């Protein structure tokens, strides 16, 4: 077979570690070499295709370690399929997603995992991997965890929230953590005190407080902080590492920071919605606030400074989207007159790289930190590095040519996610994805989609590389 070579010339290559003006040679789906632009080595290269990246950034494809395509929730299903969701990811410069396979209570992990393999197989525009949601921790499922780790499903999510759906009690959480400590699997935690929250939900509805904004009021920041604290202590008892998903509150960040100051293997993720949106959105008039219902909920704006600080000080390591879209019409509307029936989730897989570049423009983070929290660290955290998350010889050629000067307005009119609204409608951002390669194949070509369903491959993962 003849080799297929692409040359990306003249750009500023930005990784978590370096910024260097270099040409990048791609061969047979991998990064073959980098050389200084204009050097003899680079000038000697020939290729079937040359991409001019002059004045642009050349960055690794984004790794979104938290998505929910086709997730059943609250009597409906997330509106993005693996096909539409991964295509939107590509448009936004994300070339790998890690989605959550769900175990149904009373059923085997294998059954849940196989259902997710079937949903994704032959549908994805970019590469994908899976975490496993544990809804039912028992002797059988604990044994199955070992088998999944061997298969490259090396992380398991537990819920302190959603009693009667995904909820695990402290004893079940401890057992799963002990198993993770033994088999190398990373435990991911949705840290909110769901038992207490359900009491507050019931009381709010009894008072006639049914609007979307009450969703944020009952899911109190202190109950996120309390659950985060409890999860950390349980992980210490089990001798297990812990990754807390979608951290939204200042008090929860403080719990993570305190644990990390003790040198504990505790990690935290936040999401763009907590960095850019707030309870002001939940309180939008009419039923508009329903668009912003997710859990953990949006917080008052003053929490944002603590999240940005956590990202700068590395008390938070990753920004993922928790992409879980539901259409306003017909899905979010299920909760008219009862906020507790609004499906929880926001669309965002297409917006993450651009919003975080805007954070660079705004001075919240550096360029390299942008790549670190969006590409390199999620890849390392979930056993995908250096195959994913960097631009280095031997790495998969998941590469984005990014125009840092282009301006765009985020809108449902122009996004590619299969959802009828944008959480960032009308927001102006500076920076735009121009061209995207997934394993050397051009999937976005100067603003045109040239990819295909089925190009994306399942990627088995090694264990967490921070341990």
Image (cartoon, rainbow, N blue to C red):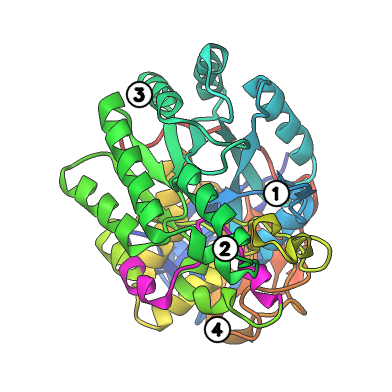
Q: Is residue 47 visible?
A: no
The residue beneath circle 1 is: 69
The residue beneath circle 3 is: 181
Mark 4 and mark 1 lie on one chain; the one further toward the N terminus is: 1
Report the residue at 32% width, 32% height from top: 234
* Nearer to us: label 2 or label 3: 2
Mark 2 and mark 4 lie on one chain; the one further toward the N terminus is: 2
Magenta part of the chain:
287-307
Q: Where is residue 294 in the image (x, y as percent from the top left)?
A: 58, 60
Report the residue at 28% width, 50% height from top: 256
**Secondary structure at numbered mark 2:** helix
The residue beneath circle 4 is: 429
* Nearer to us: label 2 or label 4: 2
Q: Position of residue 379 (x, y in %)?
A: 46, 46
Mark 2 and mark 1 lie on one chain; the one further toward the N terminus is: 1
**Secondary structure at numbered mark 4:** strand
Look at the picture and state if 331 lies above or below 358.
above
Mark 1 and mark 3 lie on one chain; the one further toward the N terminus is: 1
The residue beneath circle 2 is: 215
Quarter in which the N terminus is drawn: top right
Mark 2 vs mark 4, CA separation in Å: 29 Å
């Amino acid at each position: 077979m003849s080799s297929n070579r692409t040359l990306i010339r003249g750009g500023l290559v930005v990784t978590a570690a370096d910024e260097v003006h270099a040409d990048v040679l791609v061969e047979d789906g991998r990064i073959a070499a980098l050389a200084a632009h204009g050097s003899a080595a680079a000038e000697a290269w020939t290729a079937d295709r040359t991409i001019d990246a002059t004045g642009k950034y050349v960055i690794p494809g984004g790794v979104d370690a938290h998505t929910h395509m086709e997730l059943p929730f609250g009597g409906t299903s997330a509106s993005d399929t693996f096909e539409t969701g991964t295509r939107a990811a590509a448009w936004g410069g994300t070339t790998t997603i890690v989605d959550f396979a769900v175990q149904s209570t009373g059923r085997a992990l294998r059954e849940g995992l196989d259902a997710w393999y079937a949903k994704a197989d032959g549908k994805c525009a970019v590469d994908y991997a899976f975490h496993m949601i544990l809804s039912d921790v028992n002797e059988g499922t604990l044994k199955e965890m070992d088998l999944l780790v061997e298969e490259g499903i090396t992380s398991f999510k537990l819920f302190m929230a959603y009693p009667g759906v995904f909820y695990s009690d402290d004893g079940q959480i401890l057992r799963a953590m002990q198993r993770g400590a033994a088999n190398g699997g990373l435990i991911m935690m949705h840290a909110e005190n769901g038992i207490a929250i359900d009491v507050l939900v019931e009381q709010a509805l009894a008072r006639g407080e049914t609007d979307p904004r009450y969703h944020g009021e009952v899911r109190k920041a202190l109950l996120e902080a309390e659950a985060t604290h409890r999860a950390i202590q349980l992980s210490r008892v089990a001798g297990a590492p812990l990754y807390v998903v979608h951290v939204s509150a200042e008090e929860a960040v403080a719990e993570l920071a305190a644990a990390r100051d003790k040198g504990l293997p505790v990690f935290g993720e936040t999401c763009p919605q907590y960095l850019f949106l707030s309870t002001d959105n939940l309180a939008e008039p009419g039923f508009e606030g329903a668009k912003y219902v997710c859990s953990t909920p949006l917080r008052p704006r003053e929490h944002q400074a603590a999240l940005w600080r956590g990202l700068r000080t590395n008390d938070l390591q990753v920004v993922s989207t928790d992409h879980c879209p539901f259409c306003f019409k017909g899905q979010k509307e299920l909760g008219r007159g009862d906020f507790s029936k609004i499906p929880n989730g926001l669309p965002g897989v297409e917006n993450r790289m651009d919003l975080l570049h805007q954070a660079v423009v705004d001075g919240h983070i550096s360029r390299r930190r942008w790549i670190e929290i969006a590409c390199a660290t999620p890849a390392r955290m979930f056993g995908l590095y250096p195959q994913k998350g960097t631009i280095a010889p031997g790495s998969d050629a998941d590469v984005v040519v990014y125009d840092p000067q282009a301006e765009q307005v985020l809108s449902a009119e122009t996004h590619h996610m299969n959802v009828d609204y944008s959480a960032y409608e009308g927001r102006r951002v500076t920076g735009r994805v121009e061209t995207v390669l997934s394993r050397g194949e051009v999937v976005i070509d100067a603003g045109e989609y040239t990819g295909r369903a089925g190009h994306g491959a399942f990627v088995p993962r090694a264990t967490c590389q921070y341990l």
